[in-house]
Image (tube, rainbow, N blue to C red):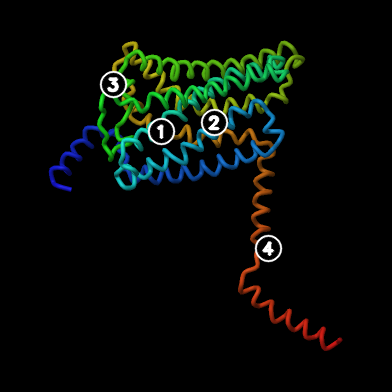
């Protein structure tokens, strides 16, 4: 590479630098540790939700299963690709197609997760207070399964269609995250506003008010009706599951949305500038921490972990190493010789 090319690339990096004073190598190790722990927890929770028939049949667990699959996609694609950039200071595959795929796989799971959690905040009210709405297969399809299918397909179709739109000939820089690429459709003020309202404001309102009102509604019904209309023990895990998930979004998702909305209505841009700066980096922790918030879904968690540890220990104890087998061969041969002499 010539000196002019090196200087121009350094100039572009300065222009598009994210401004976060955290070295790439530090980000790499933080992401590596976080991703490994999150991936293990995600597989553990998914295994029990899918192979435990009681958990799999629970309607309130279906949205959690889909979200965990979205987390799994991100942890196996966009997170390792970001780590590669942090480690080698260049994009893994230096082609426009890869950059578009990277952007698509980053945007789609993130927005689908937010919409699914927003819907879960509403659906909990139905499952607890209006369970007759899902009492038949037909009702379950329209009230429970159809919204989940629509949310996932909507995200895949919309972002799968809009992400490759590069009619404005946006350039690609292969030493910056996502190659600095984003679809040209975001240059449209109408589409950007629509995305902000549906993907940001609506999800935030559903998560914030849905989870808060659920707790208040349970408390009021529990006091006024002396638990005749609601069985606290039956729905306690369902409510705690939503609250643990919502708390994650209260910390990492709602503040940047509220700040962006405040900037839209006239708040000075320098207010909350530091939070806006670090927001995109720490938004990955919605992916990393979500599996841990779902651990409350697993009944008898301690017992299940102990069983896995015991099975692992038994497998190791039953393994016969070559040196152990070699030491046993003479003993076996002596026993056979003794048998032949007796006969």
Find numbered disc 1 in the image and state the secondary structure of the residue it sits on. Answer: helix
Q: Split into 4 quadrants, where in the image is the C terminus?
A: bottom right
Q: Position of residue 55 (x, y in %)?
A: 68, 33
Residue 228's tag is none
Q: Nearer the viewer, mark 4 or mark 3?
A: 4
N-terminal of the two: label 3 or label 2?
Answer: 2
- Distance, label 1 to label 2, CA atoms, is 18 Å
Q: Position of residue 182 (x, y in %)?
A: 33, 27
N-terminal of the two: label 1 or label 2?
Answer: 2
Left or right for 256, reference 341: left
Which residue is labeled 1 in the image? 282
Which residue is labeled 2 in the image? 67
Which residue is labeled 4 in the image? 318
Q: Nearer the viewer, mark 1 or mark 4?
A: 4
249 or 150, which is in the foreground?
Answer: 150
Indicate whether 308 appears above or below 183.
below
Indicate whether 293 appears above or below 342.
above
Indicate whether 275 appears above or below 291.
above
Find numbered disc 2 in the image and state the secondary structure of the residue it sits on. Answer: helix
């Amino acid at each position: 590479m010539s000196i002019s090319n090196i200087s121009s690339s350094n100039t572009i990096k300065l222009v598009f630098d994210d401004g976060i004073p955290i070295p790439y190598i530090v980000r790499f190790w933080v992401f590596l540790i976080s991703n490994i722990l999150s991936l293990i927890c995600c597989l553990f929770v998914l295994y029990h939700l899918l192979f435990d028939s009681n958990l799999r049949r629970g309607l309130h667990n279906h949205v959690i299963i889909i979200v965990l699959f979205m987390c799994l996609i991100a942890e196996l694609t966009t997170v390792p690709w970001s780590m590669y950039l942090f480690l080698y200071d260049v994009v893994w595959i230096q082609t426009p197609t890869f950059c578009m795929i990277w952007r698509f796989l980053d945007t789609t799971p993130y927005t689908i997760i937010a919409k699914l959690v927003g819907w879960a905040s509403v659906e909990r009210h139905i499952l607890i207070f209006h369970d007759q709405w899902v009492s038949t297969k037909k009702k379950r399809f329209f009230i429970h399964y159809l919204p989940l299918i629509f949310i996932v397909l909507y995200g895949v179709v919309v972002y799968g269609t809009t992400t490759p739109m590069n009619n404005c000939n946006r350039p690609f820089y292969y030493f910056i995250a996502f190659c600095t690429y984003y679809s040209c459709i975001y240059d449209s003020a109408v589409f950007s506003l629509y995305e902000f309202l549906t993907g940001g404001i609506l999800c935030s309102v559903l998560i914030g008010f849905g989870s808060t009102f659920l707790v208040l509604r349970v408390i009021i019904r529990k006091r006024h009706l002396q638990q005749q209309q609601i069985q606290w023990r039956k729905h306690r895990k369902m409510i705690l599951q939503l609250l643990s998930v919502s708390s994650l979004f209260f910390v990492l998702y709602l503040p940047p949305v509220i700040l962006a909305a405040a900037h839209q209505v006239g708040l000075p841009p320098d207010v909350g500038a530091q939070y806006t700066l670090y927001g995109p980096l720490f938004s990955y922790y919605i992916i990393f921490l979500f599996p841990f918030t779902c651990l409350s879904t697993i009944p008898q968690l301690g017992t299940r972990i102990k069983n896995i540890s015991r099975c692992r220990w038994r497998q190791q104890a039953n393994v016969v190493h070559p040196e152990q087998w070699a030491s046993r061969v003479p003993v076996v041969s002596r026993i056979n010789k003794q048998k032949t002499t007796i006969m």
